[in-house]
Amino acid sequence: MSKPLTDFPNHKRDHQHGKDTRCKDCLKKYNQGKAIARKGASAKPEKCQCCNIKTDKLHLDHCHETYAFRGWLCMNCNTGIGRLGDSIEGLTSALNYLKSTNGNQI
């Protein structure tokens, strides 16, 4: 299904010719979900709750289906988990891959 370009808000950074990749309706739903997650969030710790590295730039991690707050993550952990599908299956698949290569470079 195609939507007209006017359904997409301008983006702060020019990633997609000045337009956000999410339509206005999807962006509104996303922002509402993040607001729900923020309400359940604990205080920001000093370290990423995944890799334990100290950083001033922690990101709110939340379930994209229920919007439940999960924790505070650094950018690398947050995007890494997201790119692996935000699922145990995706993370397990990556772990099994590394185990199968004995952690060696290919």
Image: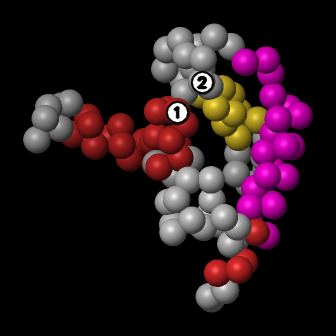
Q: Label 2 is placed on what type of residue? A: Lys
Residue 105 percent coordinates (x, y): 13, 35
Residue at (66, 64) in percent of width and height: 10
Question: Magenta stretch?
Answer: 25-44
Quarter of the image with the C terminus is top left
Numbered mark located on residue 39 in the image:
none
Mark before the other along the chain sequence, 1 or 2? 2
Rendered location of residue 59, percent (x, y): 64, 32
| Label 1: few (<14), some (14–19) or many (≥20) C-alpha neighbours in 10 Å | some
Which disc, if any, is residue 57? 2
Q: Quadrant of the N terminus?
A: bottom right
Residues at circles 1 and 2 in contact by the CB criterion of under 8 Å: yes
**Which of 15 and 103 lies nearest the eye of the viewer?**
15
Magenta stretch mostly in which secondary structure? helix
Res 87 seen here: no
Q: Nearer the viewer, residue 10 or 73?
A: 10
**Which residue: 80% across, 21% down?**
42
